[in-house]
Image (cartoon, grey):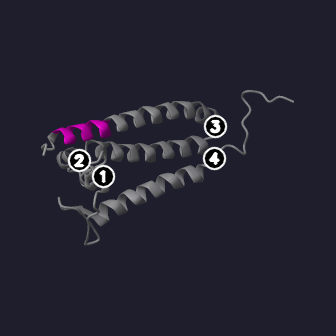
């Protein structure tokens, strides 16, 4: 027996509470990260402790790694210091934008499910998948572009 294309399998539909809980978890993590971190230029302070992690890529190849400065960039972007975030790593700003889009996306999904708009929810799944691919490509290009610019600034020895 075949199913109609408009029938919705209730087992595969996520609950609005689950969708909203993902948005709330992301908001709480964003707030905790903002409150607990401080960008000091030489490292990241987390609750008063300086976190400086050695870069093994730089130690082995004597070049900055593709994600060099990404954490400092994200912390600066969270503190709305966009110029510093851009200077540290271009992709850090993109990560924060992605984080905010994730929150909005999950909240919208919860609202659609609460209102009983399962068909709209299912139709938008494909759209958001394509947006995710575009976002990933832009993030990758920014990371590679930032890395190339930093490698070109390294003095040859």
Question: Which residue appears farthest toward the front when viewing the image?
Answer: 157
User: From mark 3 to mark 2, how far is it between C-alphas?
Assistant: 50 Å
Label 1 belongs to which residue?
Answer: 57
Q: Secondary structure at mark 2?
A: loop
Label 3 belongs to which residue?
Answer: 118
Q: Which region of the structure is painted magenta?
A: 142-152
Q: Earlier in the sequence, mark 3 or mark 1?
A: 1
Which mark, residue 14?
A: 4
Which residue is drawn at the image coordinates 36% and 37% (left, top)? 140
Q: Secondary structure at mark 1?
A: helix
User: From mark 1 to mark 2, how far is it between C-alphas?
Assistant: 7 Å
Q: Is residue 33 left or right of residue 25?
A: left
Label 2 belongs to which residue?
Answer: 63
> Viewer-nearest of labels 4 and 1?
1
Which residue is drawn at the image coordinates 30% and 52% (left, top)? 57
Q: Earlier in the sequence, mark 2 or mark 4?
A: 4
Whole-percent x, y for residue 24 in the image: 47, 56
Q: Earlier in the sequence, mark 4 or mark 1?
A: 4
Q: Is residue 127 left or right of residue 34?
A: right
User: From mark 4 to mark 1, how far is it between C-alphas?
Assistant: 41 Å
Which residue is drawn at the image coordinates 29% and 63% (left, top)? 53
Residue 125 in the image: above or below residue 81: above
Q: Are marks 1 and 2 in contact (CB under 8 Å)?
A: yes
Quadrant of the snapshot with the N terminus? top right
Whole-percent x, y for residue 157 in the image: 12, 46
* Residue sitting nearer the eye, 57 or 144: 57
Whole-percent x, y for residue 21 in the image: 53, 55
User: From mark 3 to mark 1, how far is it between C-alphas?
Assistant: 47 Å
């Amino acid at each position: 027996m075949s199913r109609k294309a408009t029938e919705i399998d209730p087992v595969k539909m996520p609950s609005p509470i689950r969708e909203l809980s993902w948005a709330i978890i992301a908001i709480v993590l964003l707030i905790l990260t903002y409150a607990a971190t401080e960008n000091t230029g030489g490292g990241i302070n987390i609750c008063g402790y300086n976190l400086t992690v050695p870069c093994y890529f730089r130690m082995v190849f004597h070049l900055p790694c593709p994600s060099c400065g990404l954490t400092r960039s994200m912390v600066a972007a969270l503190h709305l210091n966009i110029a510093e975030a851009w200077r540290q790593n271009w992709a850090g700003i993109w990560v924060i934008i992605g984080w905010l889009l994730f929150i909005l996306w999950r909240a919208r999904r919860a609202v659609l499910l609460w209102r009983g708009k399962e068909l709209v929810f299912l139709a938008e799944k494909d759209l958001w998948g394509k947006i995710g691919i575009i976002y990933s490509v832009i993030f990758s290009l920014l990371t590679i572009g930032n890395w190339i610019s930093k490698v070109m600034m390294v003095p040859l020895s």
